[in-house]
Amino acid sequence: MAKTDDYIYVIEVKLDGTVQEALDRILNTNYLQPYLDDRRRKIALGITFSSETRKVADYLVQEVPLK
């Protein structure tokens, strides 16, 4: 998790998984629960690393809507 004056970023990293799995983990767990009343925009960032290439394979960013 990273915080700025305007944003709260929640980051999930998977090794050899999919970015959708990483993003779904953020969205389907309570990672953001403590920050629901916070005025800052919430950004979910799913990242996958490839063990074969040893690099970031893909990433997906989604803003989490206010409830």
Image (cartoon, rainbow, N blue to C red):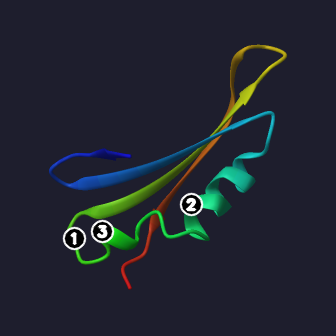
Query: SS class of the residue under badge 3?
Result: helix
The residue sitting at 66% across, 51% down in the picture is 22
Q: Tell me the amino acid under the disc marked 1.
A: Asp
Q: Tell which of 7 and 26 is nearer to you.
A: 26
Q: Quadrant of residue 23?
A: bottom right
Query: SS class of the residue under badge 2?
Result: helix
**First reached walking from the N terminus: tag 2 or tag 1:** 2
Residue 6 vs 36, above or below: the answer is above
The C terminus: image quadrant: bottom left
Alpha carbon distance from label 3 to label 2: 13 Å
Residue on which the image places disc 3 = 35
Q: Tell me the amino acid under the disc marked 2.
A: Ile
Q: Quadrant of residue 38?
A: bottom left
Is there CB contact under 8 Å for labels 1 and 3? yes
Q: Tell which of 29 and 18 is nearer to you.
A: 29
Residue most toward the bottom? Answer: 67
Residue 42 lies, in percent from the top left, at: 36, 62
The residue sitting at 79% across, 14% down in the picture is 53
Label for residue 26? Answer: 2
Residue 13 lies, in percent from the top left, at: 61, 39
Left or right of 27? Residue 55 is: right
The residue sitting at 19% across, 70% down in the picture is 39
Residue most toward the top? Answer: 53
